[in-house]
């Protein structure tokens, strides 16, 4: 049995709706959008926003931040119009306001694209269940905290939204609009747009083989251009050398991913596969095409990137096509829940197992649940109703137990934290611990079990909107202080004596904002070294030097670097050592007795990181920073 396809969308749009009902729906949408903001909080310019905002700042401070080597001959920014737009916005509004405004606008258009796609897949109040499930789940498509709908001033969420709008247009038969939207996504972020382009060709190719022939022709043209060694295309047959490859992070190589990483993608693909198996029509084609594109992108990365070291494939990162599977999987789960309504208990088994896998989608546990879902689906006609009901209820009980246990563990971890509620919220969202109870409420509403009275929708909208206003801006006080860009007068007056780079111990963009100087070495400089061998070699030489002296770390699980006079002298002996070093002091510590800082600055809003020190993780307060000078191969 399969569900009927949604009715004609144009007819639905023209159907008369009572004004009061429309007002109720507006409050419902406001409530869902409020939840969307609450579950996607703004944490400032972090992760890849370091790169894009820093690049814009470099244009305004060419003799300061602009001297950072990561912005010289950058091989990434030229492929997107986003940096140009960001630079203009920062020039008009300033970096903090422009960044926050772009992050908010990214969530607005992503939510609008999601609602458009949901209306193309489902009708009535049921479509809001698709939106609600996607709102609840922070979709991760790799093991290294890479999510969809990132609330950041970066081009990825904008390109993702354009792709979702394109898919909605495709389902509604508006092919021209879909192509234009994919073109817009391509000029924003070509890598993210490729997934949508692939789905377009497979979706249309299932009806007209000329689309598949066109796709094959495009691939053949790329191979021919590479064989002729034309610009850019020649990278396809250019291998990345071993030295360059060793500098890159493991997430660029899916063959090096752990089972935890692969299980995240497996759960998404299994959800799409089960929905395609049960549903019909355009929905089935969409989910099959999405699963095929994601699988093909991963296979291309493993074979051409990991195995053959194709420079073009490593830089294009086709494994990122999995983002679309991750974005559509919650909607597919919602459709499975709707499809199972009124069915025999055996129909609930496979979706229930997948729901359990979603709770903890990392490791052998989730893989085994995917296998259990496959077995349950294949053998559902052979399992009795009573037994199925018991298994489903037991699974739901296990899910509730796991959610409560995970929440309890999170509370125990955060109890010693300086701001436990803030860290607890981060753990709840990162672990999707909010999904289980809220998804159950969403199903009850979509199934008509919960009342849909106007008062309920109005109250939901008002409460959700109020909480979003209070909770969306989730920046720490220290992050706000950094992004305000108020220079440290005690340091700036001293470092003015000698121009050049600054090494800020365990820092990121503090050197740019607080000193107006380029970084000598920081983890954020490694974000784009896949696009430049010269940058990669410089990064490797400097990071190896600092790592050998235990003044730098590459992984959060490594011990926090420590400073001594001997290590500082050895660090400053390097020919290209920076003229200045800034080093953090924790928990009101004094400078080491064998080190003589030129100045000490007490942070008005200390950071409170969870760091590994002497082999044990602990909460620390970065209360002060000391400024040290490297001169003639020795510290002063």
Image: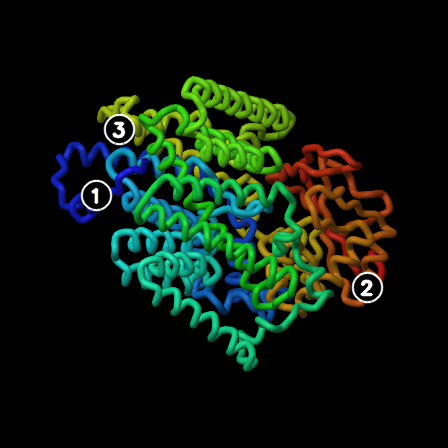
Q: Quadrant of the C terminus?
A: bottom right
Question: Which element is circle 2 on?
Answer: loop
Question: Which element is circle 1 on?
Answer: loop
Q: Which mark is residue 438?
A: none
Q: Pointer 2: residues within 10 angstroms few (<14), some, or many (20+)?
A: some
At 25% from the left edge and 42% from the top edge, which residue is drawn?
A: 6
Question: Of discs 1 and 2, which sits in the foreground?
Answer: 1
Q: Earlier in the sequence, mark 3 or mark 2?
A: 3
State the residue position of label 2.
574
Marks 3 and 1 sit apart, C-alpha to C-alpha, by 28 Å
State the residue position of label 3.
458
Q: Earlier in the sequence, mark 3 or mark 1?
A: 1
Q: Is residue 199 above or below residue 609?
A: below
* Residue 485 seen in this snapshot: yes
Residue 202 % position (x, y): 39, 58
Quadrant position of residue 515 = bottom right
Quadrant position of residue 236 = bottom right
At 45% from the left edge and 60% from the top edge, which residue is drawn?
A: 194
Question: Which element is circle 3 on?
Answer: helix
Q: Nearer the viewer, residue 187 or 490?
A: 187
Q: Nearer the viewer, residue 511 or 457?
A: 457
Residue 623 % position (x, y): 68, 39
Disc 3 + disc 2, Cβ < 8 Å: no
* Residue 91 seen in this snapshot: no
Q: Pointer 3: residues within 10 angstroms few (<14), some, or many (20+)?
A: some
Q: Which mark is residue 7?
A: 1
């Amino acid at each position: 049995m399969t569900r009927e396809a949604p009715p004609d969308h144009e007819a639905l749009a023209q159907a008369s709706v009572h004004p009061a009902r429309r007002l109720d729906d507006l409050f419902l949408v406001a409530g869902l959008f409020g939840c969307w903001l609450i579950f996607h909080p703004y944490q400032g310019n972090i992760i890849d926003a370091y790169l894009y905002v820093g690049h814009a700042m470099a244009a305004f401070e060419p003799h300061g931040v602009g001297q950072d080597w990561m912005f010289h001959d950058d091989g990434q920014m030229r492929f997107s119009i986003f940096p140009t737009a960001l630079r203009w916005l920062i020039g008009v509004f300033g970096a903090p306001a422009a960044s926050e405004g772009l992050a908010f606008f990214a969530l607005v258009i992503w939510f609008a694209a999601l609602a458009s796609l949901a209306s193309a897949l489902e009708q009535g109040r049921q479509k809001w269940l698709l939106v609600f499930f996607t709102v609840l789940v922070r979709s991760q498509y790799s093991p290294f905290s890479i999510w969809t709908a990132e609330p950041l001033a970066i081009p990825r969420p904008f390109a993702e939204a354009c792709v979702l709008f394109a898919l909605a247009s495709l389902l509604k038969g508006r092919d021209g609009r879909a192509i234009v939207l994919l073109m817009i996504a391509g000029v924003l972020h070509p890598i993210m747009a490729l997934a949508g382009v692939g789905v377009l060709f497979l979706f249309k190719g299932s009806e007209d083989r000329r689309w598949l022939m066109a796709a094959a022709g495009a691939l053949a043209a790329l191979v021919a251009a590479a064989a002729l060694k034309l610009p850019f295309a020649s990278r396809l047959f250019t291998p990345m050398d071993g030295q360059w490859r060793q500098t890159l992070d493991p997430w660029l190589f899916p063959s090096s991913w752990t089972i935890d990483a692969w299980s995240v993608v497996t759960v998404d693909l299994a959800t799409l596969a089960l929905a395609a198996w049960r549903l019909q029509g355009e929905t089935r084609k969409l989910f099959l095409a999405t699963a095929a594109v994601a699988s093909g992108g991963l296979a291309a990365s493993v074979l051409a990137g990991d195995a053959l070291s194709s420079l073009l494939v490593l830089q294009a990162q086709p494994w990122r096509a999995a983002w679309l599977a991750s974005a559509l999987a919650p909607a597919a789960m919602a459709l499975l829940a709707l499809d199972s309504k009124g069915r025999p208990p055996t129909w609930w088994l496979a979706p229930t197992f997948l729901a359990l896998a979603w709770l903890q989608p990392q490791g052998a546990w989730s893989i085994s649940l995917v296998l259990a879902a496959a077995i349950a689906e294949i053998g559902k006609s052979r399992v009795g109703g009573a037994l199925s009901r018991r298994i489903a209820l037991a699974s739901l009980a296990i899910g509730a137990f796991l959610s409560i246990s995970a929440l309890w563990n999170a509370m125990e971890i955060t109890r010693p934290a300086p701001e436990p509620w803030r860290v607890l919220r981060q753990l709840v969202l990162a672990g999707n611990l909010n999904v289980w109870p809220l998804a159950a409420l969403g199903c009850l509403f979509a199934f008509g079990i919960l009342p849909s009275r106007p008062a309920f929708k109005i109250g939901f909208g008002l409460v959700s909107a109020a909480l979003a206003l209070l909770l969306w801006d989730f920046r720490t006080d220290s992050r706000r202080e950094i992004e305000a860009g108020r220079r440290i007068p005690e340091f700036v007056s001293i470092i003015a004596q000698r121009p050049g780079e600054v090494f800020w111990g365990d820092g990121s963009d503090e050197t740019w904002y607080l000193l107006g100087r380029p970084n000598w070495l920081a983890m954020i400089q490694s974000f784009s070294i896949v696009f430049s061998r010269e940058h990669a070699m410089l990064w490797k030489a400097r990071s190896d030097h600092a790592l050998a002296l235990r003044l730098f770390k590459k992984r959060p699980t490594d011990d926090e670097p420590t400073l001594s006079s001997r290590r500082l002298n050895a660090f400053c002996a390097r020919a290209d050592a920076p003229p200045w070093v800034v080093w953090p002091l924790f928990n009101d510590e004094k400078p080491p007795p064998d080190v003589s800082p030129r100045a000490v600055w007490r942070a008005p809003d200390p950071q409170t990181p969870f760091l590994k020190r002497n082999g044990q993780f602990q909460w620390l307060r970065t209360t002060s920073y000391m400024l040290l000078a490297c001169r003639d191969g020795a510290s002063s």
